[in-house]
Image (spheres, rainbow, N blue to C red):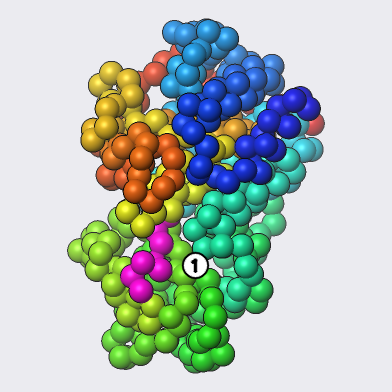
């Protein structure tokens, strides 16, 4: 176990995007093979699944050969676990459309530490390491949790290592709806006008609860060094016919900064510790401790540059749940496999919406009844 931990620590300690793709691929393959082998020892269902995989684990020559799971399996009740119940420190739950079952992933202390280090390494590459005032476009209740924490709260907490001071921009209205605390936000902006500031919120919450009301009132917060990070909620804005360029320009006008300071990132509870911010070219990149593979919907083979397919995410960070290799329900386009003008090495990709509702292939040999949380 120590050797694997040391390898993961090395992957987390280096600059996240500057490792040559061939070196990264070999490093990930070695760690993931070992992790999957250990996971099989912890869970009979996973072991049965991998025994039926077309390529034997030790025969895999690239990450794309390794057995992956459909992300929907993480909606299981009870949540899938690779550790004893007494080792579980927290359960994270995904955001989900009304009527859908959210994913739930269990974190032990080791996975939680890796998750924090992963997000910090990625965000540092985009905004630097300095602590700064942190304005959360949400209510404080979002981060209050006992044993479970939702997607909004998890995202807010993941950025707290960059916070020198923390403030919340929203409260509740008389009917329990989210409401902008305008005077509080204006006071924050007045006090933090000079110097870097970090702002984070879910995309649709920033738009509906902050940008629209302030823009309608003709208010500019005059914070030229603000960096606005946002994630999630694009589906709701698409229903309002708000496209990404308009969103960036409108947010920038309200904060008084450049549209380049508005950074969209993709993250998912099922891949804790890894987020995918847009680079200056509008592409997303995988850090050295993770990878993405875009697979053809019909053959499930990796696609060529310029092609679209189903997104698979890969990460060495999970230790408490089987989230190492997951076939998501999102579509993506491979822009290039290396050579993005932003300078970051490896694949550059863009999201292209959700997978049309269809039966996922590749999981027919898994009997869900054999997945279980090990007894304490």
Residue 23 forms part of the magenta stretch? no
Rendering coords of residue 280 (x, y %) = 36, 57
Query: Is residue 260 a member of the stretch shown in magenta?
Result: yes
Left or right of 50? Residue 241 is left
Which residue is nearer to you in this view: 348 or 109?
A: 348
Q: Residue 25 location in percent, x, y?
A: 50, 26
Q: Can residue 77 be seen in this view?
A: no
Name the residue: 29% across, 40% down.
Answer: 335
Which residues are drawn in magenta? 258-265
Point 28% across, 18% down: residue? 299
x, y percentage for residue 33? 59, 19
Left or right, 297 with reference to 318? left
Residue at 48%, 26% (x, y): give it: 22
> Percent position (x, y) of residue 211?
35, 77
Q: Can residue 61 be seen in this view?
A: yes
The crowding category of the residue bearing disc 1, from other C-alpha atoms within 10 Å (few below 14, some 14 to 19, many at least 20), is: many
Q: Which of the 4 quarters of the picture holds residue 359?
A: top left
Task: State the residue position of label 1.
Answer: 200
Count of labels in the image: 1
Name the image quarter holding the C terminus. top right
């Amino acid at each position: 176990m120590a050797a694997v931990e040391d390898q993961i620590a090395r992957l987390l300690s280096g600059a996240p995007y500057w490792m040559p793709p061939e070196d990264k691929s070999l490093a990930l393959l070695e760690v993931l093979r070992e992790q999957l082998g250990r996971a099989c020892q912890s869970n009979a269902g996973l072991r049965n699944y991998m025994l039926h995989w077309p390529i034997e684990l030790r025969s895999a020559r690239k990450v794309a050969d390794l057995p992956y799971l459909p992300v929907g399996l993480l909606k299981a009740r009870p949540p899938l676990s690779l550790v004893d119940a007494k080792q579980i420190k927290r359960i994270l739950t995904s955001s989900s459309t009304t009527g859908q079952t959210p994913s739930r992933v269990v974190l032990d202390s080791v996975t939680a530490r890796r998750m924090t280090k992963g997000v910090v390494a990625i965000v540092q590459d985009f905004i630097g390491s300095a602590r700064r005032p942190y304005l959360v476009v949400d209510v404080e209740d979002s981060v209050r949790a006992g044993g479970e924490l939702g997607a909004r709260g998890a995202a807010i907490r993941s950025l707290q290592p960059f916070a020198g001071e923390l403030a919340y921009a929203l409260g509740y209205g008389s009917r329990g709806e989210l409401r902008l605390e305008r005077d509080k936000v204006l006071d924050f902006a007045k006090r933090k006008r000079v110097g870097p500031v970090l702002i984070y919120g879910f995309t649709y919450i920033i738009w509906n609860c902050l940008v629209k009301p302030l823009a309608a009132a003709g208010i500019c917060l005059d914070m030229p060094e603000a960096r606005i990070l946002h994630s999630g909620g694009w589906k709701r804005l698409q229903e309002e016919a708000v496209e990404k360029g308009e969103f960036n320009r409108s947010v920038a006008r309200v904060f008084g900064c450049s549209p380049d300071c508005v950074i969209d990132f993709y993250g998912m509870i099922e891949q804790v510790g890894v987020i995918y911010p847009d680079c200056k070219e509008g592409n997303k990149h995988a850090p050295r401790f993770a990878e993405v593979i875009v697979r053809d919907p019909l053959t499930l083979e990796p696609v060529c540059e310029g092609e679209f397919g189903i997104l698979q995410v890969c990460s060495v960070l999970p230790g408490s749940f089987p989230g190492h290799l997951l076939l998501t329900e999102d579509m993506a386009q491979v822009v290039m496999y290396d050579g993005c003008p932003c300078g970051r090495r490896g694949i550059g990709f863009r999201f292209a919406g959700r997978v049309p509702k269809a039966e996922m292939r590749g999981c027919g040999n898994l009997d869900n009844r054999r997945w279980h949380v090990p007894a304490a």
